[in-house]
Each structure stands twice: as structure tokens, then as C-alpha cells.
Amino acid sequence: MSQEMGQKKKIDKGMRIDEIFSTFPERAQKLAQLMTNKGLACVGCGAAAWETLEAGMLSHGFDEEAIDQMVIDLNAILSQELDLDTIKMTERAAKKFREFAKLEGKEGAALRFGCKPGGCSGFEYVLDFEMEPGEHDEVFSSFDVGIFVNKEVLGRLLGCEIDYQDGLSGSGFKISNPNAKGSCSCGSSQNY
């Protein structure tokens, strides 16, 4: 990552959308999620990736104040510390997981988290209920929810944060993976 006067590079409104993701690949999924959640639909559009953030937002009807706020919010994501030694859930995701477990009659279950070959980008995430860890599992915990991960795929998943989003464009568990080098525009598969 390039340095400017001893500080880490930051996002500005003059950066191209594709440049934002390529400059910060370890944060690309979270950055794209934020942009999409705020209504910037061109994030997944290959034709618009060459636009600057400002041009993309202006063409979607945003004003200068909204653009400035987007830059602040994107840089806030960059300032969050990455913990590449664990896998964690947000409090919202843990609560939703417990709700789903109760509905399925699996109260007290842990999350089985993994990835398998598939999807348009190469790998897709696996989320399931699991009562006990397997012999080859690494065990994590977040907000009193166990997270079981097979050691074979652990290197691809360390540093992941699992969140839950509700919205008009889709509800579900969203995974931010600092190891992913790219993902499909629908966000359901990734490559390493």
C-alpha cells in the first residue's frame, strides 16, 4: 500500500471505483457493501468501474454533501483494525443466527462456517448449524455463538467478519473476507 507523508493512503472522491477496490483488496467486500447499501448500484457494474466515485454518485443523483459523507464512511472502514487471527460475527449476526437456530429447533447450535468450490467466482461460503466441532475443526466464539471451521479452509477464512443485513436489495448474512481477491457482483462467491 502506498504511503503519503507517513500516512496510509485514503479514499477520495476523485478515485475510480475500480481503483478503490484494487488499492484496498482486503477491504473491498466491506467497501462495496457500504456503497451498494447507500444506493450506489454501479459498484457491481463493469462498465461503471472506470468512473470516479464522484462521477458515479453524481450520475445516480447524489449531491456533494452525500459524496463527502460517502468518502468519510469509506475511510472509516479503512480505519477499522483487521484481526487476521480469528473469525468473528457482529452482534447483529449472532442475534440473527440464534433466532434462526431456535426456529429450526437447534437452540445452542454453533455456526459451521466454510467455503467450497462453486459460484461464478470460484468459491462460495457455507453456513450451517452444527452441535459439536469435528476432529479437524478450529473453534472460535463471537457473542456467545461458537464458530466451527475445518482447518483445511482456515487460511482462506481467517480475518472474516460475518454480519447480517436487512434491506430491500436482499437480507442475509454478509461476509467480509480480507483474503478474497475478487468476488462476483452478487457477492455470493469469491476467489482467492
Image (spheres, rainbow, N blue to C red):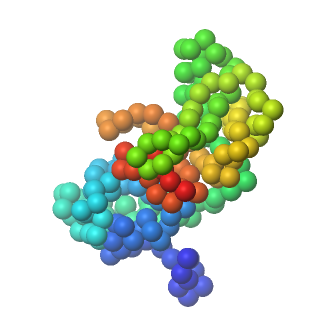
Residue 147 at x, y = what percent?
69, 35
Residue at point 32% right, 54% down?
44
189 to the left or right of 130: left
Between 18 and 145, the residue placed more toward the observer is 18
Residue 169 at x, y = what percent?
32, 38
Between 153 and 186, the residue placed more toward the observer is 153
The relative height of residue 58 versus residue 173 in the rendered view (above or below) is below
Res 56 quadrant in image: bottom left
Total residue callouts: 0
Residue 132 at x, y = what percent?
76, 24
Q: Is residue 140 visible?
A: no
The relative height of residue 178 versus residue 163 in the rendered view (above or below) is below
Residue 14 at x, y = what percent?
32, 75
User: Which of the image's four quarters has the N terminus?
Assistant: bottom right
Q: Is residue 105 visible?
A: yes
Residue at point 68% right, 56% down?
84
User: Which of the image's four quarters has the C terminus?
Assistant: bottom right
Residue at point 58% right, 57% down?
179
Residue at point 64% right, 16% down?
106
109 to the left or right of 117: right
* Residue farthest along the right direction in this orientation: 135
Between 115 and 16, the residue placed more toward the observer is 115
* Residue farthest along the bottom direction in this orientation: 5
